[in-house]
Image (cartoon, rainbow, N blue to C red):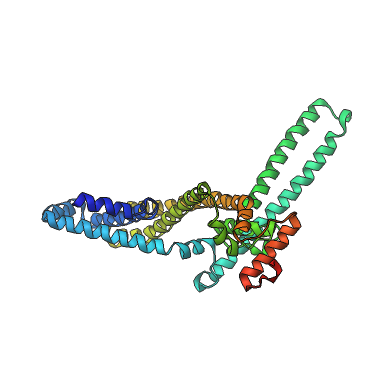
Amino acid sequence: MFSTVLKEFSGFLDKRFLAMIFAPSLAFWSLLVGLVTMTQGIATSLRLWERQPFAFQLFLIAIFLGWTLFFAYLLASLLTPLTKLFEGYWDDIWLLRWLGENRRNQRRAEFDFLEQERKRLIDRGKSIQQDLGAGSQISTVQHAKLHRELRQVEAERTAAYEKIYYHFPPTSRPEAIIPTRFGNIFKSTELYPDVHYGIDAVLLWPRLYHVLPTNVLESLGDAKSSMDFMLVVCTLSCVHAIAGGLIALIGGLNALVFLAVFAGSLLMCWLAYRGAIEAALSYGQIIRTAFDLHRRDLLASLGLDPPLDFMSERRLWSDINMWLFRGSPEKLS
């Protein structure tokens, strides 16, 4: 009977939930329990554990796993506000409001620098091409040197453009920059359909999602799971740095243990955040592709004929936006 119940229970728990949230939660609470054990002395704690009846040991393990499972479900329910926190929507949090404005200014300065650098590299590339156009007026050595410099300039220009394209809102929307790198990647993805097609992604994405092919949905799910996993690990690592550090200090553990717990947790937090940024880039690219390839499938699902040219399509999506937002379908008739 136990094996049957366990099989049904494991089927109930989604594999992504187990890997994405439950496993990090289990590691988080296990590490905290391990630190508490160290404050009491490992040998003393082991002797105390061994003196307990087996049934009571199983009861304690069940309580621990049950609490961890409840905590994981609670964390799963908070993924949306947690994601928005990482995106940098801090205006409603007075403790973070000043920090948010400061970080937004930093991101704007970074954006301006990259844009100026991109323009400088474009001008430099044109200048090199003019020098190369001189032909016989330059030596073979100079010609080869200019070609190497041109390749380097083009590589740097491409890198700057990709940084702007993927990590910031479109150059036509510099006012949309928000405080965090993670959030600007999402903002870039969110504004992509509007800039290219006139599609309001906030309104249309929930509808487009339901007409996407299975393989696209699977790719989206994998990318979203990777991103959520990294955000969960980042959050729990940050909390562990504080909680674990306090346990080490209050419990009288030596300074080396405190530094290992505190610095190690912060390092894991930083690595997980970098991983979340990379996962967000992949997730955003899949969403861009979904709008590029399947927006006409959405038109068909809405019972509308595809437009004949690009400008007609932009006008149609603008009308659809108004139709969904204000309920004014007369332009679509």
Residue 284 x %, y %: 57, 53
Q: Residue at x 63, y 62 (%)?
A: 177
Q: Residue at x 23, y 60 (%)?
A: 63
Seen in the picture, residue 146 relative to 251 is either above or below; the reply is: above
Left or right of 214? Residue 132 is right
Left or right of 159? Residue 232 is left
Q: Is residue 266 visible?
A: no
Residue 307 x %, y %: 71, 56
> Which is more toward the observer, 197 or 225?
197
Q: Residue at x 73, y 53 (%)?
A: 116
Left or right of 107? Residue 67 is left
Q: Residue at x 58, y 55 (%)?
A: 185
Seen in the picture, residue 228 relative to 147 is either above or below; the reply is: below
Q: Which residue of the protein is positioned furthest toward the top in this rendering? A: 140
Residue 311 x %, y %: 75, 58
Q: Is residue 163 visible?
A: yes
> Which is more toward the observer, 87 or 197?
197
Left or right of 172? Residue 278 is left
Q: The C terminus lies in which quarter of the figure?
A: bottom right
> Which is more toward the observer, 302 or 147?
302
> Which is more toward the observer, 241 or 163?
163
Residue 316 x %, y %: 70, 62
